[in-house]
Image (cartoon, helix red, strand yellow):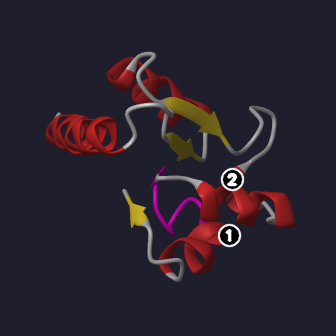
Amino acid sequence: MKKHTFLTIVIVSFWMEASAAMADTKATVLVTIKPLAMLVKGVVGDELTVQQLLPGNISPHDYALKFSDVRAINEAALVVWVGPELESAFSKPLTGNGKEVL
């Protein structure tokens, strides 16, 4: 329950900051897997664009990133992922890009 509360607080604070900074355009929140996409979409509603990186039928355990995935990571305002234990393919691109990662 604490993780969900923390996730909600971080996303809402990001949403408030992004709303003020980008009044005309919607910021993109990139999520790695469908359960996270549903959680984030439930929190931000229609205020932010939520983009899911992995299709529902692909396992995040042994996924190989494509160039388009790296581009999506670099263009996203916020990236939400489970962590290196589940999604090891994302560790290097997420920690080395200087973006806000949750």
Residue 63 position, x and y percent, is 78, 60
Rendered view: 99 above or below 33: below
Residue 82 painted magenta: yes
Q: Is mark 2 on a helix, strand or loop?
A: helix
Residue 7 painted magenta: no
Compare residues 9 and 55 and report the one nearer the observer. Answer: 9
Q: Mark 1 highlights which residue?
A: 89
Identify the image quadrant of the N terminus: top left
Say which residue appears at 65% left-offset and 37% top-offset.
Answer: 52
Quadrant of res 45: top left
Residue 33 position, x and y percent, is 61, 40
Q: Is the magenta stretch mostly helix, strand or loop?
A: loop
The image's mark for residue 3 is none
From this viewpoint, is residue 66 visible? no
For the residues labelled 1 and 2, the Cα–Cα distance comes to: 8 Å
Instruction: Name the residue type under label 1.
Output: Ala
Instruction: Name the residue type under label 2.
Output: Pro
Say which residue appears at 55% left-offset and 32% top-offset.
Answer: 50
